Image (tube, rainbow, N blue to C red):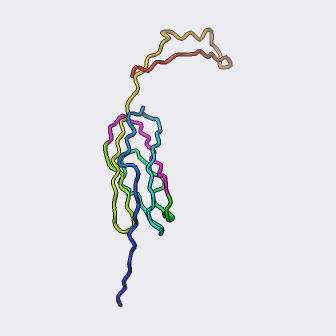
């Protein structure tokens, strides 16, 4: 028995060649986008490689695009440690095509200055009283 099949190659265009998120404070979630456009009159299948850069999530990871459809992939980055990432996000299209999008982001620990030198909460001796004071922070970066 011999089984023969033909797979139509998907023809899609990814509008971004790179996704540079810049400098991001630690613990801050940032979202970027990647836009894919199906250039054919037939459906296209895509899959985002599971070998993503650390702390990165792409939604949706896989799917089907209708003819002439434009799809926006959301790239979320959230790191709790300071790091510098230069990597690729790989998108696979039906027919064996792989497209790499350069991805870079730097997470930093913000340097701040507190303007108040003393916080005086007054006479708080019981759990029923609470003291609230306003403080002012200034970014040094």
Q: Which residues are magenta?
A: 70-85
The residue at the point 52 percent across, 16 percent down is 136
Residue 81 position, x and y percent, is 38, 36
Q: Relative to 128, is 99 above or below?
A: below
Q: Indicate the quadrant where residue 44 lies.
A: bottom left
Residue 68 falls left or right of residue 130: left
Q: Tell which of 43 and 21 is nearer to you.
A: 43
- Does 74 appear in magenta? yes
Who is closer to the viewer here, 30 or 110? 30
Left or right: 32 as drawn, with respect to 83: right
Residue 10 vs 29, above or below: the answer is below
Q: Position of residue 54 (x, y in %)?
A: 37, 46
Residue 29 magenta-highlighted = no
- Which residue is located at x 36 percent, y 83 percent? 4
Q: Magenta region's main secondary structure?
A: strand
Which quadrant of the figure contains the C terminus?
top left
Q: Residue at x 38, y 44 (%)?
A: 19
Quadrant occupied by the N terminus: bottom left
Residue at the far bottom in the pictured view: 1
* Residue 5 locus on image (x, y percent): 38, 80
Identify the residue at image location x=61%, y=17%. 132
**In which quadrant of the rendered view does residue 129 lie?**
top right
């Amino acid at each position: 028995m011999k089984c023969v099949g033909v797979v139509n190659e998907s023809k899609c265009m990814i509008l971004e060649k790179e996704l540079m998120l810049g400098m991001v404070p630690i613990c801050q979630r940032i979202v970027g986008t990647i836009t894919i456009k199906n250039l054919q009159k037939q459906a296209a299948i895509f899959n985002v490689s599971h070998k993503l850069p650390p702390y990165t999530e792409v939604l949706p990871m896989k799917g089907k695009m209708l003819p002439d459809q434009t799809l926006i992939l959301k790239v979320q980055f959230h790191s709790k440690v300071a790091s510098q990432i230069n990597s690729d996000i790989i998108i696979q299209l039906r027919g064996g095509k792989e497209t790499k999008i350069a991805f870079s982001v730097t997470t930093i620990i913000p340097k701040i200055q507190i303007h108040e030198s003393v916080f005086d909460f007054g006479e708080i001796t019981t759990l029923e009283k609470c003291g609230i004071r306003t403080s002012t922070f200034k970014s040094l970066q």
